[in-house]
Amino acid sequence: MTSPPGNRRKYFLPLVLLIALLFGAIIADVWTGDAEATRTVTPMRIVSVLASHLSVPGLHLPPAPGTVDTIVWSIRLPRVLGGAMIGMLLALAGVAFQSLLLNPLADPYFIGVSSGAGLGAAVITLLGGTGLLAGFAPTLAAFAAGLAAVMLVYALARVNGRVPVQTFLLAGIVVGSALYSLTKLTVSLAFRSGEAYKATAILTQLLGSLNYLGWRDVGLLLPFGVIGALVLGANWRELNMMALGEESAAHLGVDTERFKRRVLVAGTLVTAAAVSVGGIIAFVGMVVPQIARRIVGPDHRRLLPTSMLLGGLVLVVADWLSRVYLQGLDIGVITSLIGAPVFCWLLRQRMVTMG
C-alpha cells in the first residue's frame, strides 16, 4: 500500500534535514580544533586534501601543506567517520532490541551485549592479540563474547520453551553487571603484569573513546556494520509486527523464537563492532531510538534509517564538543552526562502518559 504524498513528505523532510546536519557536523568536526590548528586547516585546504587522496577527476587544487594533510586525512577524518559509524550502529542495535523486547529501557548496554563485547575485546588486549587476524581479532572476540553473553541471558530467561521479554531484560542487567566486573578485573591484571599500556587501553574501552581511531578502525567497522544493518533492515516488517506484541506477531505468521535469535545475533554483531573500536558508549542505543520515534513514528522502515542518522549525528557532535571545548574528554563520559538526564525526562514522560 502506497503512502499518501503528504505522509511521504512528512517522513522525507526529517531524513533530508538529518543528512544535512550530519554532513555539516562532520565538516565542522574536521575543520575546527584549537585556535592554531583552525587557522591552518581551512575549508579550501580540506577540499584539497580530499581531492588529492580520493583522486577526484577534473579538480586541480594546490596541494595542502604536509601538516594539514596529516591533521585532516590521518587524524581527524577517520576519527569523525568512525564516530559517526559507531553512533549509527549503536542506535541501530537500540532500535532492534527495544522493538524485540517491547521495552524502551532495552539497549545493548542493559541487556549485557556491550559488557560481553567489552570483556571479549579486553581479554584480547590483555593477551596482546590485538594485531592478530589482520587486526580483526578484537572485533571477532567482542562478537563471540557478546553473543555468548546474549546466549547466557537467553538461557537464564527461557521458561517452558519461551523467553518472556521482561525476564530477558532483568537477566541481561544481572549478566551485564557481572561481565562489566570481569572487565575491570582485566584492568587490575594488566596493571599487576607491569604492562600499564594494556591497562590504559582497557580503561579507554571502559570509558568509551574516539581518541585513537584510524582508517584501520573504520575498515573494521564497515563489514560488520553493513552485514548487521542489512539483516535488520531486511526485517523491518517483522519488527513492526513484534512491536504489536509477541502473540500478535505469531498470529501474523512470524516465527517469534527464530526471529528473536536472528535479531539478537544481528544486534550483537553491530554492537560488537562498535564496542571493539570505540569502547562502551552508554545511552546512545537507548535514547536515540526514542527521540527518532518522536520524529518519524514507530514504522521501522523509517525508524531504522532515522535512528542511524541521528545516532551518527549525536556522536559527531559529542566528539566536536570533546575536542573543541572539553580538552579531549572521553566520549562515553559525554554521552552519559547528556544521555542520563534526557533518559530521565523520557522516562518521566512515559510514566505520565501511562497513568
Image (spheres, grey):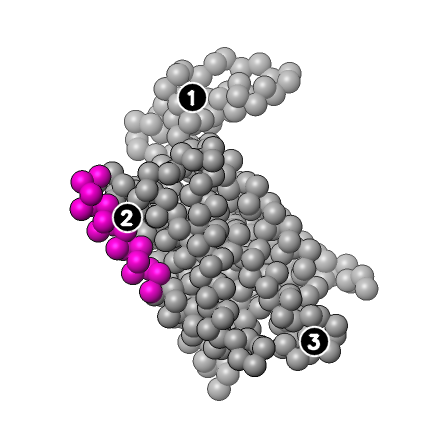
Query: Which residue occupies 24% across, 45% down?
Result: 190
Query: Which residue occupies 53% across, 64% down?
Result: 97
Task: Identify which residue, 315 or 161, lies in the foreground.
Answer: 161
Q: CA distance from mark 3 to mark 1?
A: 56 Å
| Circle 2 residue | 203
| Circle 1 residue | 69
Q: Which residues are magenta?
A: 178-195
Task: Examine the residues drawn in magenta and state their main secondary structure.
Answer: helix
Q: Is residue 30 left or right of residue 60?
A: left
Point out the residue furthest to the right here.
Answer: 1
Instruction: Report helix, strand or loop for mark 2.
Output: helix
Q: Is residue 161 above or below residue 130?
A: below
Assess whether residue 193 is covered by the magenta stretch: yes
> In the image, what residue type sits under mark 2?
Leu
Assess whether residue 307 is covered by the magenta stretch: no
- Other-residue count near label 3 (Cα within 10 Å), few / some / many at <14 / 14–19 / ≥20: some
Q: Quadrant of the N terminus?
A: bottom right
Q: Is residue 21 above or below residue 260?
A: above
Q: Earlier in the sequence, mark 2 or mark 3?
A: 2
